[in-house]
Every structure is written in structure tokens, then in C-alpha cells.
Image (tube, rainbow, N blue to C red):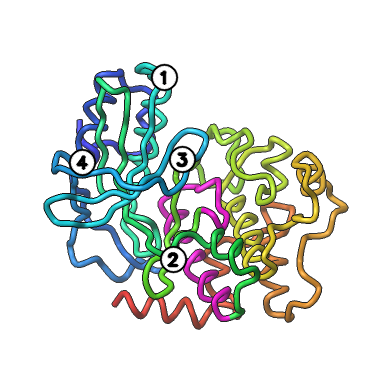
Amino acid sequence: MGLASLPGSPAGSMEPEKIAEFLSRAEPLPAVPRNPIDGEFQAEGDLLPTLPPKPWEKGELLGAGTFARVYKGKQIESGKVIAVKEFVLEGHDRAQLAAIAEEVTTMRSVHHRNVIGCLGAQYLPEESTVYVFLEFACGGSVGHAVARNGALPPPTVRSYTAQIVVALAHLHDLKIVHRDLKGANCLLLQQDLLKLADFGSAARSNAGVATMQSAGFAGIRGTAYFMAPEVIRGDGYGRRSDVWSLGGTVVEMMTGKPPWGCYDNQMTVMYRIASPDEPPPIPSDVDSTIEDFLLQCFVRDTTQRATARILADHPFIRDMVKSLLASTE
């Protein structure tokens, strides 16, 4: 069973040996429309390359999370620098394998200039290890840039916001919800090209509603500062929950701190976000255009909160979005 034959989210129902086979293969996927807004422009047919079983070597550690470590890697034959996400399994745990298979399936179903590319996956059962091969982001993350330099210049905030919105619009058109949008998961390549990354919390739904608890999206996912109120309340997580997190990411870029960053206690942050009387965390010195953009992100009623497609036409980023789309022609 190859990657291209796994639509939706079937990994949880696969037998362990099928999951192992799936993770050890990396069949190219058909090209999909590049344009996230109207889908008019098609990719030129170039498919994501497959790396395994070509020899590669592991380099320096780039970062570590709860479930995986990310290393700088190199494909020996071509010298191509890649990122390698390493999962060390607890034995051959079926749930872990299924979760990784789901992440790979989601990433391989997306081909977009503002989403990090998944180049393949390799499962080594004798080592209880899975490697997922990704595009290498030479510029680090927006989160690192903010931590290093503080608030970003307004033109940079505008450019990055437009790219995030374009990527979100495309993901949401595919019914993929990221569920952990924040600066740390917005990676930077050359010439300020931004790509969304880390789909470990992402999920896909066939539902068309704003908050999809009935589709299995209930439960808390993501980072507290960027969580939407409905997520904290346990009402479920939908595409417009990503839009709330987008607003938080814009605040992070503008101020150098996450929304509600004045609170160190995560429970306090979650209480503030969930409280209907708490005003949205909009800086007092922003101009009216940016303020309106953020207000549309921070609407507590999910049915009234803007979608990524609507925000793509907001005056704050409209011209930048048009420029991005023109560059894909």
C-alpha cells in the first residue's frame, strides 16, 4: 500500500505490518493546484522526490519535541541538505506508528510553496525508529527570529502573515486543520519564503462545519497561548480555530511575545482565553487596518470568525497575497 493510495486518515485502522510497509515507501503524489485561493494555476507536474533508500547521513541536532528529534541531514549522492525527523518508538507500538503514518499521509497530500515538503519516510523496525525526510529550512523559524530579535519590522509581519494565510487557505480547502499554528511552526527559507511545518497535530475532516467535535476533533491540541476558546472549552477544533491561532501568531510577530505573554502560568492563560469577558490581546499602538484584521481573527463565536479565504482579501495583506499568487503563474 503506497502513500498515494491513502486518502483521508486511514492509518488508525491499518495493521502494524501494513503501517510498516506504508512508512517504508515514498511514492510520488500527483501534482495538485498551487493556487490556494482560486485553484486556477497548476504545478508544472514536478513531483516531490523520494529519498529512501538512497544513502543519507545524520548531522547536527536542530531541535527536539515531546515525540521526535529533528536533525540536519544530507543525501550523500547529491549532497542535498535535508531535515530528518526521528521518532524512536516504544517497541513497535501500533498507536505510535499509526500517528506517524497519519502525519506523513497529511504532509504528502499537500504540494504548496508555503507548506514544508515531505520527501519520504523510512521505517527501521530493527531499531524501532522512523525517519521522516523534509525540506530543510535554512532560516530557522519565525519563533526563533522573534526570540532572537524581538518584534519584527512591519513589512516583514505583513509578508509573513500573507504567506501564512495563503497556506492556511490551501490546507483548509483540502479539509486539513493544522491545530498547532504558531511562530515556531512557521519555517523560513531563502529570501523570506515562509513554510508551515509540523503536522503532528494536524487532522483531516470531511465535515464542513466551523467546529467539528462530531468529526473527532474534540480535545486540546496546540500551545496554550495560541489556543482558540472553543478548544479550551472542549467544544472541538475546526478550521476557524486555526484562524484564531493565526491572530496569535501575528501578535507574536508584532510584539515579540505570544498573546497573553504577560502570564507565565498556562492555566491562567487558558482561563483568560476561555473567558467571554476577556478582550482580545490586540496591542494598543497598532493601526486601524491591522486592528481590524486581528479583530476578525479573535471573534469568539466561531460561526462569525473569518475564514482564511476571507482574510486573504483583507486590506492588511490583499496586495501581498495578489503578489504571491502572481508569482505562481
Mark 4 = which residue? 26
Which mark lies nearer to you, 4 or 1?
Answer: 1
Q: Is residue 205 visible?
A: no
Mark 2 = which residue? 194
Which mark lies nearer to you, 3 or 1?
Answer: 1
**As drawn, is 100 to the left or to the right of 157?**
left
Give the quarter of the image for residue 116. Answer: bottom left
Which is more N-terminal, label 3 or label 2? Answer: 2
Which mark lies nearer to you, 2 or 1?
Answer: 1
Q: Residue furthest front?
A: 60
Task: Name the element at disc 3.
Answer: loop
* Point 57% across, 60% down: residue: 307
Which is more N-terminal, label 4 or label 3? Answer: 4
Q: Amino acid at mark 2?
A: Leu
Mark 1 = which residue? 90
> Residue 316's x, y, as percent?
60, 78
> Residue 75's x, y, as percent?
19, 50
Q: CA distance from mark 2 to mark 3?
A: 19 Å
Q: Amino acid at mark 1?
A: Glu
Q: CA distance from mark 2 to mark 1?
A: 34 Å
Decide which of 51, 171 is in the foreground and name it. Answer: 51
**As drawn, is 132 to the left or to the right of 313?**
left
* Point 32% across, 55% down: residue: 135
Task: Name the element at disc 1.
Answer: loop
Q: CA distance from mark 2 to mark 4?
A: 25 Å
